[in-house]
């Protein structure tokens, strides 16, 4: 059977590729350069980026050096389309970034206001634009008998707003998280959706000469179904996809790849459905931004690439389509000024009326008018469609593009003038403070927690703390059971790491421990049976619906310590270890050699939990410990603040009280300096009280009962702390610490080690710095 040779697609022409690279080089250089100059002039960088297309386009470069312009930007459609593809990628990425910064819950809460602003913000400029177009001279029409279609096209162009420009302006001015920013974004999204629906109707009328109401109704139905599916099924699906990729591959690169794959896929779907790819990209950004696993680092990397490379190319490319030299004609200039005035007035009046109807303040209405006036590339796209359909003349196309550029450039200074005059309400201020605090939070930024275990009492108590700590947070907890390589899971290993994992067993790995036979048999079933171990650990965790639980078995092929460290390298934010043993001699590692090596080499923060065996009964207090009183020694360091967050999170769930305590060491001076020493001690106490009160305030904002004590130590502070624990009947001591480099071992400091060894209740030590 003869082989049929398929036609081979010729590669892109060498000169065309050279031109594309040089065009990108020139646009990015000028856009970023003008963007920097704009920021130095106290304007958002998008102003300079929009002007870049005018500078290197036909308006300036084409007028000053037409030969150079034609050589760099030839009129060949195929060449311009290559540049346009890169520009569209930048547009999609900018919409994704906008979605990442969008608070869906806040938009839903302000949906009534946004809808009112959007509808009025479309209706009024549409009416104004239609009236203007209907009375324009016939020379601005392609055909006098198409005045209705022409007027509808102009009206649609006047009513549109540009989400990309609005989003970039809000991000440049750090307004995205403000209420006014979120309402502007929500209104812009609704405005654009209405605009695209109107465009589909008008374009259908231009092609066929009749209004296709059926097509419009179909578009509206598709849009509603898409949004409904996206924010229900899509919300759960996006969360599962991001978590799966992060678990299977891990790293920021995989997260960003996943984000772009989803954006391009959903964008393709929405474009196929006739509701524009940019809407699909925006929705993907919202959904992925709602996934906690897509953390700040990944968002920052995506933002750097988008804002630094692709967005400037998109904005600069938009200006290449317009030749403002046509505005030198007096008639065109007069019509252009009239169109600009109508566009600005229509959008201001419409959004102000909508804002007033929604109960917003005067300055909020004016600010919305300023933001929604930015028309940017969306209006340019509409003008391009009108030109391609033969509805717009070249002069009218230039006027509409001029309106798009001028309104986009004027939006930032207007917002800069109006937004500071909006009085920030107490509710908004508290929300912004909570968001800022969560950005700095240790617990709130955890996404994955690893607990190596074979079911010991220490690891069970650790699991209990993790379950309480992560309640209400979107955190994945992984129980990791180590199966011994090439042997049964029964019996301890002879290596140091094996002995540590043997001590992760409920009886400490000592068959002669003070437990009865029935208890020993039950304990042995936990250590030998991963399923039984996972069952116990899952019960201790008691996770709620916000958390995911993974139970994994890892074969101990290179030693338990190395296996734990290898797993911890897979993108975990916190490693939680049961103490299992304590060093017998003064110079021994605090928690044993294996735990010591894990702490020293761990790629993430580590929390070690010692459940503290009751020495009178030989049993641990996993079940009996009610956790009603938590002692939190603090010195105001970052690791103390992280430990405080853990303590507050545990206390909030258990309705427990947290006691913050700090001991002041008095200066060691001779008796003749007693007065000055007392004065110094008093100053130290006042200073430390401020630190302790600041930490206590964070707990109280979380709804936790917090008491504070700043004491002057008469003996060594660690000895007085242990005595305080004994007298106060505390159920848990939570401490933060940092590692001190001492002979390659995990040394937390003499005070921490003394408390761990001598406290009569469970102790957790968090090393996060």
Image (spheres, rainbow, N blue to C red):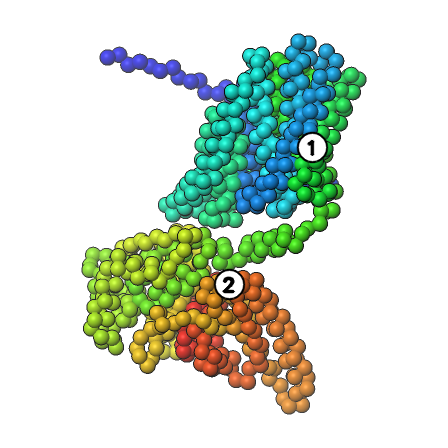
For image coordinates 72% across by 33% down, the residue present is 349
The location of residue 207, given as percent across then percent down, is 56, 13
Instruction: Tell us which disc is closer to us: 2 or 1.
Output: 1
The location of residue 444, given as percent across then percent down, is 50, 56
For image coordinates 79% across by 17% down, the residue present is 330
Tell me, yes or no, if residue 724 can be seen here.
Answer: yes
The location of residue 465, given as percent across then percent down, is 41, 64
SS class, disc 2: helix
Q: Is residue 469 above or below residue 261?
A: below
> What residue occupies the far bottom of the structure in this picture?
671
| Image mark for residue 350 | 1
For image coordinates 23% across by 57% down, the residue present is 485
The location of residue 483, given as percent across then percent down, is 26, 58
Q: Camera-side residue: 68 or 322?
A: 322
Quadrant of the drawing holding the N terminus = top left
Tell me, yes or no, if residue 589 can be seen here.
Answer: no
Q: Is residue 448 above or below residue 168?
A: below
Left or right: residue 747 compared with residue 617: right
Instruction: State the image quarter where residue 637 is shown.
Output: bottom right
Q: Camera-side residue: 677 or 448?
A: 448
Left or right: residue 472 compared with residue 675: left
Q: Is residue 86 above or below residue 417?
A: above
For image coordinates 45% across by 52% down, the residue present is 474
Q: Callout 1: few (<14), some (14-19), or many (20+) C-alpha neighbours within 10 Å?
A: many
Q: State which tag comes first along the sequence, 2 or 1.
A: 1
| Image mark for residue 645 | 2
């Amino acid at each position: 059977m003869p082989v049929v040779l398929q036609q081979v697609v010729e590669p892109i022409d060498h000169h065309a590729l050279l031109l594309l690279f040089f065009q990108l080089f020139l646009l990015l250089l000028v856009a970023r350069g003008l963007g920097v100059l704009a920021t130095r002039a106290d304007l958002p960088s998008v102003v300079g980026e929009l002007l870049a297309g005018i500078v290197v386009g036909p308006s300036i470069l084409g007028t000053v050096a037409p030969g150079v312009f034609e050589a760099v930007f030839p009129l060949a459609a195929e060449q311009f389309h290559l540049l346009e593809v890169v520009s569209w990628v930048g547009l999609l990425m900018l919409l994704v970034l906008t979605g990442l910064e969008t608070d869906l819950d806040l938009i839903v809460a302000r949906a009534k206001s946004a809808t009112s602003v959007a509808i009025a913000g479309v209706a009024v400029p549409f009416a104004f634009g239609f009236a203007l177009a209907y009375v324009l001279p016939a020379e601005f029409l392609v055909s006098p008998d198409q005045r209705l279609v022409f007027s509808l096209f102009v009206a649609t162009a006047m009513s549109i707003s540009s989400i990309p420009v609005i989003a970039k302006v809000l991000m440049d001015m750090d307004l995205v998280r403000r209420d006014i920013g979120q309402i502007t974004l929500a209104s812009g999204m609704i405005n654009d959706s209405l605009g695209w629906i109107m465009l589909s109707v008008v374009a259908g009328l231009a092609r066929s000469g009749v209004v296709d109401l059926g097509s419009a109704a179909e578009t509206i139905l598709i849009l509603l179904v898409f949004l409904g599916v996206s924010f229900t099924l899509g919300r759960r699906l996006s969360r599962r996809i991001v978590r799966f990729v992060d678990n299977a591959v891990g790293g920021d690169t995989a997260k960003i790849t996943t984000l772009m794959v989803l954006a391009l896929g959903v964008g393709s779907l929405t474009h196929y459905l006739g509701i524009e790819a940019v809407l699909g990209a925006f929705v993907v950004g919202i959904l992925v931004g709602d996934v906690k696993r897509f953390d700040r680092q990944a968002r920052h990397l995506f933002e750097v690439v988008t804002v630094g490379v692709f967005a400037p190319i998109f904005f600069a490319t938009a200006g290449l389509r317009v030749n403002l030299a046509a505005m030198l004609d007096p008639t065109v200039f007069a019509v252009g000024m009239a169109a600009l005035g109508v566009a600005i007035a229509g959008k201001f009046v419409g959004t102000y009326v909508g804002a007033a109807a929604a109960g917003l303040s005067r300055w909020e209405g004016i600010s919305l008018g300023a933001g929604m006036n930015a028309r940017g590339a969306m209006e340019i796209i509409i003008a391009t469609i009108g030109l391609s359909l033969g509805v717009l003349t070249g002069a009218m196309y230039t006027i509409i593009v001029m309106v798009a550029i001028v309104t986009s450039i004027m939006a930032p200074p207007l917002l800069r003038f109006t937004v500071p005059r909006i009085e920030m309400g107490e509710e908004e201020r508290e929300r912004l403070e909570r968001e800022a605090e969560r950005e700095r939070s240790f617990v709130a930024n955890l996404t994955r927690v690893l607990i190596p275990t074979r079911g010991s009492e220490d690891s069970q108590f650790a699991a209990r703390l993790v379950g309480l700590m992560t309640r209400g947070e979107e955190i994945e907890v992984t129980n990791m059971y180590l199966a011994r390589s090439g042997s049964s899971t029964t019996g301890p290993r002879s290596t140091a790491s094996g002995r540590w994992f043997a001590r992760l067993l409920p009886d400490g790995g000592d068959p002669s421990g003070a437990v009865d036979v029935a208890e020993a048999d039950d304990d042995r079933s936990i250590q030998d049976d991963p399923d039984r171990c996972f069952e116990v650990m899952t019960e201790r965790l008691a996770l709620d619906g916000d958390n995911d639980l993974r139970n994994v078995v890892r074969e101990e092929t290179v030693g338990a310590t190395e296996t734990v460290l290898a797993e911890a390298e897979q993108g975990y934010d916190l490693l939680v270890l049961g103490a299992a043993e304590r060093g017998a001699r003064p110079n021994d590692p605090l928690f044993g050699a294996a735990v010591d090596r894990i702490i020293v080499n761990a790629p993430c923060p580590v929390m070690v939990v010692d459940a503290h065996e009751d020495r009178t009964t030989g049993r641990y207090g996993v079940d009996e410990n009610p956790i009603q009183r938590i002692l939190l020694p603090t010195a105001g360091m970052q690791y103390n603040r992280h430990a405080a967050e853990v303590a507050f999170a545990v206390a909030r769930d258990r309705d427990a009280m947290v006691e913050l305590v700090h001991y002041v060491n008095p200066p060691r001076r001779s008796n003749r300096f007693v007065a000055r020493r007392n004065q110094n001690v008093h100053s130290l106490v006042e200073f430390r009280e401020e630190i302790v009160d600041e930490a206590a305030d964070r707990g109280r904002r979380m709804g936790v009962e917090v008491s504070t004590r700043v004491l002057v130590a008469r003996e060594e502070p660690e000895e007085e702390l242990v005595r305080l624990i004994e007298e106060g009947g505390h159920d848990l001591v939570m401490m933060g610490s940092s590692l001190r480099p001492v002979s390659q071992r995990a040394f937390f400091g003499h005070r921490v080690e003394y408390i761990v060894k001598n406290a009569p209740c469970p102790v957790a030590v968090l090393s996060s710095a």
